[in-house]
Amino acid sequence: MSKQYYTKILKADAQSIKLAGELIKNGELVGIPTETVYGLAGNALNSNSSDKIFLAKGRPSDNPLIVHITELNDIYGLVSDFPVLAQKCAEKFWPGPLTMILPKKDVIPSQTSGGLDTVGIRIPSDITARAIIKAAGVPVAAPSANLSGSPSPTEAVHVYDDLKGKIPLIIDGEHSVVGVESTVISFLENGIHVLRPGFISPEDLTEVTPNVTVDDGVIHMLAENAVVKSPGMKYRHYSPNADVIILDGDLTGFNRFICNNADENDYCMIFDDDILKSDNQYVTYGKDSTEQAIQLFSVLRKLDELKVKKVYARCPNRNGVGLAVYNRLLRAAGFQVIKV
Ligand code: TXA
Ligand code: MG
């Protein structure tokens, strides 16, 4: 049986940050805020800590963890190659919501890298996250601090709801400012390949090289036997208990579909300025892509609180961070999309 904890939530301040750092250094796990989503932080160089992360989340052990550092210099101890293109990305986008997949050095235990010979590295910009990593004095492995499969946490209370009793401490750093997880990229001979879209969009990455490709898995369901470049793509994700169905089309098409097809208990998930032409209950998730990214995961969690069984969602636009919103919503919907 795994150890039971009394889980404390402490506001981020000098004292709680110091405590978080000590716990991480000593092999314990702490829920920490970052600019993207809350992370479940452990010592990335300690295989036991990584084992604990997988256990607490109920995460499949072949799905690798992202390693967080605060200074560019720290990367040289962790990766065996840091190509020029990656250096340019670091210069332009770090600290920030970008994770780069690079060949790992042996100091990173295979538990942390999910058995792969590569590792995802990120330098976060969130002040509290940075202070905690510095206080720990070690690189910090941190997946999103949700139970595997459920929506990622953007508030301390979401971490508490998923992990209470399993970890000793959560640091409350208020609502995450980006709201969706970091952009994950790998490097090809002469270009960048986007494995998971995030706030830093494919368009943003073209400022570093014109050769930016987006993985098929980002907006398509992978075939059962497909070779996945990023293990996280395989798994069911971000799912509320409700059956989510995306209606792809304009507001007129959405309203027509709802009026003709929705049952009275079905919910709608619409944009702030949308006017719904039926009596169905609804939740809203922002008026543009930036707001949708911030609100998406809280709204998916709220649907569970409301015990919603079925929800029809307006389809987000796919530009900029919108691609990340669409990618997460598609997974929440189990790829159920109806053109309207
Ligand atoms: O914004 C974020 O990235 C948050 C915060 C806490 O930093 N972390 C996060 O971690 O989202 P996680 O574990 O929930 O998602 C990491 C994703 C997974 O889809 C995983 O498969 C992929 O990154 N990944 C990690 N290391 C990889 C590697 N070596 N090769 C390919 N994909 C990798
Ligand atoms: Mg995650």
Image (cartoon, helix red, strand yellow):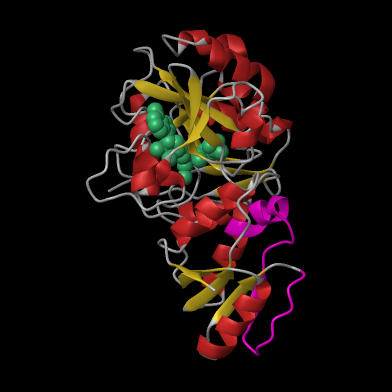
Q: Which residues are magenta?
A: 273-297
Q: Is residue 118 something that shows in the picture?
A: yes
x and y, in percent, of residue 111 in the image = 32, 28
Q: Is residue 276 magenta?
A: yes
Q: Residue at x 47, y 9 (%)?
A: 77
Q: Residue at x 53, y 83 (%)?
A: 266
**Image position of 215 (left or right of 266):** left
**Image position of 41 (left or right of 229):** right
Vertical order, 250 against 85 (above or below): below
x and y, in percent, of residue 245 in the image = 48, 70
Q: Is residue 3 something that shows in the picture?
A: no
x and y, in percent, of residue 302 in the image = 59, 68
**Image position of 258 (left or right of 112):** right
Q: Residue at x 27, y 38 (%)?
A: 227
Vertical order, 37 against 271 (above or below): above
Viewer-nearest residue: 2 or 48: 48
Outermost residue on the right side: it is 273
Quadrant (top left, top right, bottom left, bottom right) of the C terminus:
bottom right
Outermost residue on the left side: it is 225
Viewer-nearest residue: 323 or 44: 323
Q: Residue at x 66, y 57 (%)?
A: 295
Vertical order, 92 against 148 (above or below): above
Viewer-nearest residue: 227 or 328: 227
Quadrant for residue 118, please give it.
top left
